[in-house]
Image (spheres, helix red, strand yellow):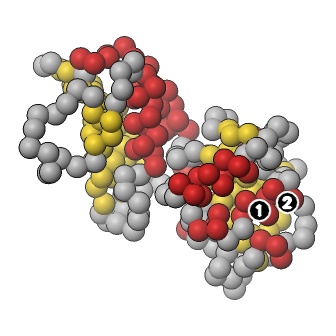
Amino acid sequence: MTNILISGCNGRMGRVIADICGKDAELHVVAGFDIVLPQTITFPVYSKFEDFTGTADALIDFSSPGSIDDGLLAFCVKRKIPAVLCTTGYSEAQTALIGEAAKLIPIFKSANMSIGINLLADIVREAAGKLGIDFDAEIVESHHRQKVDAPSGTALLLADAVKSGRSDKLENVYERQSRREPRGSGEIGISAVRGGTIPGEHTVIFAGRDEVIEFKHTVYSREVFAAGAVRAAKFIADIKEPGFYSKF
């Protein structure tokens, strides 16, 4: 039995994670953390990390970047609890704190918990290497109107995959209205669309002379991300060595 803590348990994704864990005989949610305390839930919920005094094998955080400032990492380090960080939009200072914590505990961190996106990143990396400088790379991402960060962390993850596959140096370009010049070969264009209830859609375009190759991933339910987070928690609960992990 793997004992799980859920940070942001009363949020949209937190509730889905709790539901998935509740249907898995190998998992048990021992407690949750949230600034909003629900009226009915099957496990205790705390507003502060330090109020939890039990034990756990892994923590899943699907709250907000602010949880880092509220003591999530300090709690996990002190209690030696591996963490699965599913939130995006961390500041440089918060990212640095995560890096320091990874020296002391196992941390699973990915800009996207979808199995499909992580496979797509591998495919994009290979394609970028084979197509080379003869193909321009562009990334278009679409999300619901409530998403606050742009571009998405997944778009940046895919841009990094393109860069790692290419031998030349590439620069992310987020807007072109201020550039009155032809597109440079050393660019990756990244465009963000926000509207409605789109859960998530990412398209990587490789445009060459007289031919275009597109790789696209579409999410129809947020449960995809929750299922990936739970799978990551099962994985990291068995990890003994501190460090960053992003593949399960």
Image check: 163 left or right of 244? left
Residue 78: numbered disc: 2
Mark 1 crowdedness (10 Å alpha carbons): few <14, some 14-19, many ≥20: some
Residue depicted at x 14% and y 45%: 179
- Residue 143 percent coordinates (x, y): 36, 57
Residue 158: numbered disc: none
Tell me the distance, in whole angstroms, between the alpha carbons under discs 2 and 1: 6 Å
| Res 103 quadrant in image | top right
User: Mark 1 falls on what kind of element?
Assistant: helix
Q: Quadrant of the C terminus?
A: top right
Depth order, front residue of 136/86 = 136
| Res 196 quadrant in image | bottom left
- Residue 114 percent coordinates (x, y): 54, 44
Depth order, front residue of 151/176 = 176
Mark 2 crowdedness (10 Å alpha carbons): few <14, some 14-19, many ≥20: few
Residue depicted at x 82% and y 37%: 241
Depth order, front residue of 80/59 = 80
Number of marks in the image?
Answer: 2
Farthest-out residue, bottom: 39
Residue 74: numbered disc: 1
Query: Marks 1 and 2: in contact by CB < 8 Å?
Result: yes
Residue depicted at x 27% and y 28%: 186
